[in-house]
Structure formats: C-alpha cells, structure tokens
C-alpha cells in the first residue's frame, strides 16, 4: 500500500502560483526526501499534506484516507514537524512532552508516549530543564521526540536536521531510520544532499513549484550522469 499519494496538486498563495501540478508517491515504510532550492515549494507541499493549508486542486491520499474529506482521520495518523517549530518556553522538556501527549491519550498510554518521546529526544538530565535553556539542536531533538512519540503512520518532517551539528544530525537521522525500520513511513525535506542520499529510498526534486525529477538516488545519478545528488540538483536547478 502507498503511505501517501499526491496527485496533481496546485496551490496559489496571495494570487501567486506556488505549486504547479505536484505529484509523487511515498510507499509504506519508505523514507522519501523532498529537495529543492529556497522558495521552491517544499514547505507549502508539506503543509498541504499536513492539512494546514487547504487543498486547492488535485488529490491527496494518506493510506486509505483522502483529503480534504477525511482531514480529521488524517490528523490522527500523521505527525508534522514544522521547519520553524518551537516549544512552550516556560515548560520543562518533559512537561512539554506530557502536554502534547495529553492531546492523544490519558493515563498509562500517555505515560508510555512521554517515555518514548524522552528516549527519542535523548536529552539525558536536561529533559527536566526549561525549554528556554535549550540550544537549537536540543530543541530540535525534543521536537523530533514530540513528532515521533505518538507512533504516527506517516511522519512529515520539514528539515528535521536543520541547524544541527554533525553528531546531533547523525543522531536525528538514526532516530528517523530506526522509526522507519519499525514501519514508519517518512516524508522529509532537506538541504543536505548527503543526508538525502544516505537516508532516502527515493527523492523528488521540486523547482519553482514543479516536480522536475523523482527516483531513487541511484536512478537519479544515472539519469543525469552525476556522481552524487548535489550534482543532480545543480544540473536541474540551473534550467
Ligand atoms: N503565505 C504566503 N503568501 C505568499 N507567498 C507565500 C506564502 N507562503 C509561502 N509563499 C511563497 O511560496 C514559495 C514557496 O515557499 P515554501 O516555503 O514552500 O518554500 P520552501 O521550498 O520550503 O523553501 P525553503 O527551502 O526556503 O524552506 C516562496 O516563493 C514563498 O515566498
Ligand atoms: Mg521550507
């Protein structure tokens, strides 16, 4: 089964066409990367899938739910990590996870969810500190913990490792891979071409609101006679 099918979505914002007939498919259990230059439409695509932007034309299916009609059901099976996410600064890391878990369930189940979030965030003792004392990387890890602790079926992660140092970025990649090994389907955006090549079974490149290439890293490199995905990217966005 496909985790996600996007079929011909277009979107205007402030009268400007931002997405132009975007189509791609994420298979169940796959890690799929969406790449493209600044302003290409990655966040707009992810926000539309996450039901935060209204679908204007085209169709989106997530497992067996369709947008826009099944938006309520879709929200139960996805989780979305925004590119500019923050957490409530006057809460401690653990309290923030507890707060979010309370929207999903109560009692033992909520406790287990928080525990999972704490393990994923891997902040050690600092989980008991206030969020406003966290570095950018610590905050990102807390938010990745928040996004994955509810065991979603599809995680939509907008630049999950953005701004992280080498070690933290590796850790976040490891967390995502581990979740994927346990059956999670992942759609994420990134500006790190090495990361995308390392992580993704398949990639789509969006440029000026249109998907200009899609395939496995191997297929893309072969098609464009490139040694790596950065070269593929450079060739395609020059057009
Ligand atoms: N609310 C809005 N009103 C008008 N234009 C918008 C709005 N939100 C985004 N845009 C425009 O849509 C285009 C796509 O933006 P989007 O944030 O999807 O790009 P992106 O690929 O995520 O870029 P980045 O790599 O910088 O995060 C940009 O030209 C942006 O200026
Ligand atoms: Mg973006």
Image: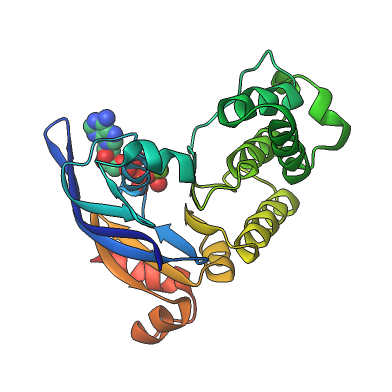
Q: Is residue 84 left or right of residue 211?
A: right
Residue under the image location 24 percent in, 41 percent down = 69
**Residue 234 occupies quadrant:** bottom left
- The percent coordinates of residue 109 (x first, y second) are 70, 36
Quadrant occupied by the N terminus? bottom left
Q: Nearer the viewer, residue 98 or 190?
A: 98
Residue 223, placed above or below residue 12 = below
- The percent coordinates of residue 7 (x first, y second) are 22, 59
Residue under the image location 21 percent in, 53 percent down = 59
- The percent coordinates of residue 55 (x first, y second) are 22, 41
**Residue 182 occupies quadrant:** bottom right
Residue 63, placed above or below residue 157 = below
Q: Is residue 61 left or right of residue 112?
A: left
Residue under the image location 34 percent in, 84 percent down = 223
- Residue reaching furthest right? 125
- The quadrant where ligand 2 appears is top left
Q: Nearer the viewer, residue 188 or 208?
A: 188
Residue 79, placed above or below residue 61 = above
Quadrant occupied by the C terminus? bottom left
Q: Nearer the viewer, residue 115 or 218?
A: 115
Residue 78 seen from this side: no
Residue under the image location 75 percent in, 19 percent down = 130
Figure coloring: rainbow
- Residue reaching furthest left? 15
- The percent coordinates of residue 235 (x first, y second) are 33, 71
């Amino acid at each position: 089964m496909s985790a996600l099918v996007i079929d011909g979505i277009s979107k205007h914002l402030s009268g400007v066409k931002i997405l132009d007939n975007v189509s791609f498919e994420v298979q169940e259990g796959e890690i799929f990367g969406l790449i493209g230059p600044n302003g290409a439409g990655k966040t707009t695509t992810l926000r539309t899938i996450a039901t935060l932007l209204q679908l204007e034309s085209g169709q989106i299916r997530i497992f067996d739910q369709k947008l826009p009609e099944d938006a309520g059901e879709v929200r139960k099976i996805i989780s979305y990590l925004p590119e500019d996410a923050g957490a409530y600064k006057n809460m401690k890391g653990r309290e923030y996870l507890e707060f979010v878990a309370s929207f999903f369930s109560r009692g033992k189940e909520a406790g287990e969810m928080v525990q999972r979030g704490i393990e994923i965030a891997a902040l050690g003792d600092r989980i008991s500190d206030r969020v406003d004392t966290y570095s950018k990387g610590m905050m990102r890890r807390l938010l990745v913990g928040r996004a994955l602790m509810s065991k979603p079926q599809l995680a939509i992660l907008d630049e999950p490792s953005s701004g992280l140092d080498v070690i933290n970025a590796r850790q976040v990649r490891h967390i995502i891979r581990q979740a994927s090994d346990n059956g999670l389907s992942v759609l994420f955006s990134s500006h790190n071409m090495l990361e995308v090549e390392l992580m993704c079974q398949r990639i789509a490149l969006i440029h000026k609101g249109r998907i200009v290439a899609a395939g496995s890293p191997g297929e893309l490199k072969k098609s464009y006679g490139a040694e790596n995905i950065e070269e593929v990217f450079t060739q395609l966005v020059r057009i």
